[in-house]
Amino acid sequence: MTYRQRLNCWAIARLLPTHQSAIIARFRNRSDADGHFQFLRWKVPHIQLLVVFDLTNQS
C-alpha cells in the first residue's frame, strides 16, 4: 500500500441488506467525510450510510 493510500482512512460505507457494507468514498479527514455524508443523506435519503474509520487495507 502506498503512502498516499494510507492517508485516506475515513470512509463512507453503505449498509447493504445482506448485513454487509460497501465503501462508497474515502477521505483524508473526518470533516470532509462528514460533509460528504451530509450531502449524500440529503441527496439520497433512503439508503443507510455510516462514516467509519477504515484500516482494513493497512498492513
Image: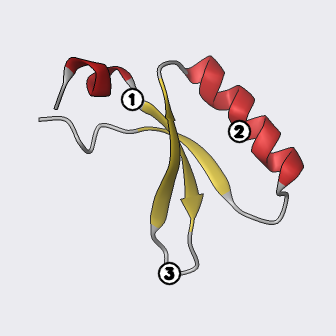
Q: CA distance from mark 3 to mark 2?
A: 22 Å
Query: Element under label 1?
Result: loop
Amino acid type indicated by mark 3: Thr
Give x and y (percent) for residue 47. 74, 64
Secondary structure beneath disc 2? helix
Please provide percent x and percent y for residue 33. 61, 29
Question: At 29% from the left edge and 37% from the top edge, which residue is drawn?
Answer: 55
- Label 3 vs label 1: CA separation? 24 Å
Name the kind of residue labelled 1 in the image: Cys
Q: Amino acid at mark 2?
A: Phe
Q: Is residue 40 above or below residue 55?
A: below
- The 10 Å Cα crowd at callout 2, few under 14, some 14 to 19, many 20 or more, is some
Residue under numbered circle 3: 18
Upstream in sequence: badge 3 or badge 1: 1
Q: On the image, numbered disc 1 is attached to which residue? A: 9
Please say if 4 is above or below 40.
above
- Nearer to us of marks 3 and 2 is 2
Q: Earlier in the sequence, mark 2 or mark 1?
A: 1
Dot 3 crowding, Cα within 10 Å, few <14, some 14–19, many 20+: few
Q: Which residue is depicted at the point 27% across and 25% down?
A: 6
Mark toward the start of the polypeptide (3 vs 2): 3
Which one is in front, 5 or 41? 5
Disc 2: which residue: 37
SS assignment at label 3: loop
| 42 in relation to 47, above or below | above
Horizontal side of 54 relative to 51 (left or right) equals left
